[in-house]
Structures are given as structure tokens and as C-alpha cells.
Image: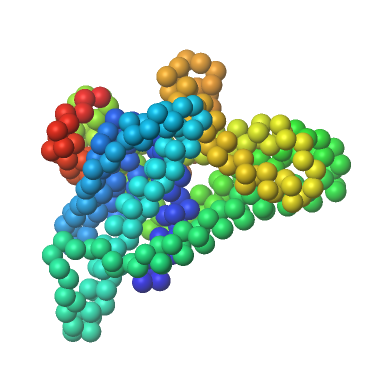
């Protein structure tokens, strides 16, 4: 159980990395022992149990841009879309965590010669909602401490040894570099653990299957395995853009005290996310432009956050995509064509 909760915390920290965070024809996210895939108006989470069975959960998924006009406005659409993606990601993650915890409880019961009665196909409630909420709050606090407070504090200390850093632009540039180093070090460290390595393999499976779909070729395991695990719409690329954009945004506001700088970093998060979304969106449509270079560092970093998947893992990603598409058609929609 402790292992499951630790994995849950780590997944929440990695969610922006594992989630594409954009309204697309298809997209997805790696979860515990599985993959969530989105179609335009539906999604499906597929998780493989220890006995090899693949269990799924699928639901309709309204597009924000079709609900309210304001969600289609620049900057606002980025914040709304990313917030919706994180909400959906949490639901998908909870399903996979429920499956994992329930399987652990069944294994413990069997080792004691007992039988755990579980309703067929019912995995809801294995992890109470308050546990998810507490984990989310703790993860958010950890994120703010590690990526907002610590880089700012270290940069402030460095200005005492190197007064030139007090320059507005240079200060925020150093702060940004420290943040990026911490981010990369954190990713590299957790990537060495077996559990997270499997997550990154499922992340690679999701990318391969999305590439397979976008190619127009039949989506199957051999074809999917022929594609790259590096995808430009990955959340890894988005986070790198966020870190670069934050340097420019912080420089615009010439605040001086430590508290003011820290509060600025919290208040500016929606602006930075919205601007970064627009840049990613523009670079995707103008791949020959200078701004397209913004996604390059994210592609390099995917050498850590994605790993070559096994055929079994690719099969899970395909199952998630197939069921999402089936639900899309069942709702009266059409099979999506890339």
C-alpha cells in the first residue's frame, strides 16, 4: 500500500510531463501500468493487471472549446485546456491507482489464505477521495517548494557572492537555469527506479501509438513499434517552454524583495501557462519557424521521460485508443481520421 501511495505521489509530480495537455484529434497520458487515450469527445484508460488481463474505463469527454466561446480565446484557452487536461489526468490516474491497490489487497489476502470479495469490474473506491486530495495538495506544495522557492532562494544567495546577478534579466535567467537543472536532476533520479522506468515505457507506448494513428496506417503492435517515442506535443516539451517563458515574464515585473518575487512566481503561473500554450500551438503549425526550436529541448529530454515499450505495453495503449474511438462512434460521432 505504501508503494502504491508513493507511486501516486510521483505520478502526480510527473503528470505535466506525461500529459500532452492540448485539445487534439488523439492524445494521451501514461498512468500506473497503463495508458489513457483521448479522442475528440471521449477517453479511455486501459490498465494491465498482474495476471495479464487488460481492464478499461471509458467516458464521454466534452471539448471545452465547444462549450463556451471564452475557452477559445488566446491565453485563456491554454489555461482552460491545461486545467481540464490535469483534471482528466487525475481521474485516469485514480483509476489506475485503484486497480493497483486492489490487486495488492487481493494478493495480501491470498497470502493469508483469505479471499477478498470484489464486484466484477468494480475498482472504484479502493483509494478514498480524501487520500487523493491530500496527495494532490502535498504534491502541489512540493512543486511550489522545489521549483519556485528553492531556485529563488539559491539565486538570492548567489547575488551575495556575485553582485552582478542582481541585474533584473540576469537574476531571472540564473533562477531559470537553476530551476531547469533541478527539473532535469529530479527526472533523471526517479527514472532510475523500476516503477518509474515502466511509467516512461508506457509513455513511450502512448507516443508510438499516437504516431501510428497520425500516419494513417493500420494501428497494430508491429506498426506502432516502428515509430519513434519522441513526440513534439509531449508535456515534456511544454514544461521546457514554460521554464523559458517564465524568465521573460518575471523580467517584465521589476519587484525587489524576496517575498514579492516569490508571490510573483505564484501569481504569474496562469499567464506563463497560457503564453507557453500559444507558443507551442504556433510552433506546431509553423515547424519551419524560429519558434519551432522551442520544442527541441523537450525532444532531447524525452530521452529520459520516454523509453522503448514492450509489445505488451504497446497493446495496452492500442486498447485504450480503440475503446476511446468506439465510444466516439457510439455517441454519434465519426471515427477520427488523422
Residue at the (79%, 51%) spot, across then down: 157
Residue at the (41%, 46%) spot, across then down: 86
Left or right, residue 323 beside residue 227: left
The colour scheme used to paint the residues is: rainbow
Front-most of 308 and 95? 95
Q: Position of residue 191 (x, y in %)?
A: 46, 52
Residue at the (62%, 56%) spot, across then down: 145
Left or right, residue 157 beside residue 236: right
Question: In terms of image quadrants, where is residue 303?
Answer: top left
Outermost top residue: 288
**Taking 103 as reference, is 141 above or below it?**
above
Q: Position of residue 241 (x, y in %)?
A: 54, 33
Q: Position of residue 237 (x, y in %)?
A: 48, 35
Which quadrant, please, contains the N terminus? bottom left
**Taking 155 as reference, is 274 above or below it?**
above
The answer to whether residue 319 is visible is: yes
The answer to whether residue 315 is visible is: no
Q: Position of residue 37 (x, y in %)?
A: 28, 42
Which quadrant, please, contains the C terminus? top left
Question: In terms of image quadrants, where is residue 337?
Answer: top left
Residue at the (16%, 29%) spot, across then down: 334
Amino acid at each position: 500500500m505504501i508503494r502504491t501511495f508513493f507511486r501516486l505521489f510521483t505520478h502526480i509530480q510527473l503528470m505535466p510531463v506525461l500529459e500532452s495537455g492540448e485539445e487534439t484529434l488523439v492524445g494521451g497520458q501514461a498512468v500506473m501500468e497503463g495508458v489513457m487515450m483521448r479522442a475528440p469527445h471521449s477517453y479511455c484508460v486501459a490498465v494491465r493487471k498482474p495476471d495479464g488481463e487488460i481492464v478499461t474505463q471509458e467516458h464521454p469527454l466534452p471539448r471545452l472549446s465547444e462549450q463556451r466561446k471564452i475557452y477559445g480565446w488566446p491565453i485563456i484557452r491554454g489555461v482552460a485546456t491545461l486545467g481540464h487536461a490535469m483534471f482528466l489526468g487525475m481521474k485516469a490516474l485514480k483509476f489506475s491507482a485503484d486497480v493497483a491497490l486492489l490487486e495488492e489487497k487481493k494478493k495480501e489476502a491470498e497470502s493469508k489464505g483469505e479471499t477478498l470479495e470484489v464486484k466484477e469490474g468494480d475498482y472504484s473506491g479502493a483509494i478514498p477521495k480524501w487520500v487523493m486530495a491530500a496527495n494532490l495538495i502535498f504534491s502541489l506544495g512540493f512543486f511550489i517548494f522545489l521549483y519556485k522557492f528553492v531556485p529563488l532562494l539559491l539565486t538570492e544567495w548567489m547575488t551575495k557572492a556575485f553582485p552582478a546577478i542582481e541585474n533584473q534579466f540576469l537574476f531571472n535567467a540564473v533562477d531559470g537555469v537553476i530551476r531547469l537543472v533541478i527539473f532535469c536532476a529530479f527526472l533523471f533520479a526517479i527514472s532510475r527506479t523500476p516503477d518509474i522506468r515502466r511509467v516512461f515505457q508506457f509513455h513511450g507506448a502512448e507516443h508510438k501509438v499516437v504516431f501510428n494513428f497520425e500516419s494513417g496506417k493500420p494501428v497494430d503492435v508491429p506498426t506502432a513499434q516502428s515509430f519513434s517515442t519522441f513526440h513534439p506535443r509531449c508535456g515534456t516539451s511544454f514544461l521546457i517552454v514554460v521554464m523559458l517563458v517564465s524568465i521573460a515574464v518575471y523580467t517584465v515585473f521589476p519587484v525587489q524583495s524576496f517575498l514579492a518575487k516569490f508571490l510573483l512566481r505564484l501569481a504569474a503561473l496562469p499567464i506563463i501557462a497560457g503564453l507557453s500554450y500559444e507558443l507551442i500551438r504556433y510552433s506546431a503549425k509553423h515547424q519551419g519557424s524560429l519558434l519551432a526550436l522551442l520544442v527541441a529541448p523537450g525532444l532531447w529530454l524525452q530521452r529520459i521521460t520516454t523509453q522503448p515499450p514492450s509489445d505488451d505495453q504497446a497493446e495496452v495503449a492500442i486498447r485504450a485508443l480503440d475503446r476511446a474511438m468506439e465510444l466516439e462512434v457510439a455517441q454519434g460521432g465519426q471515427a477520427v481520421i488523422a
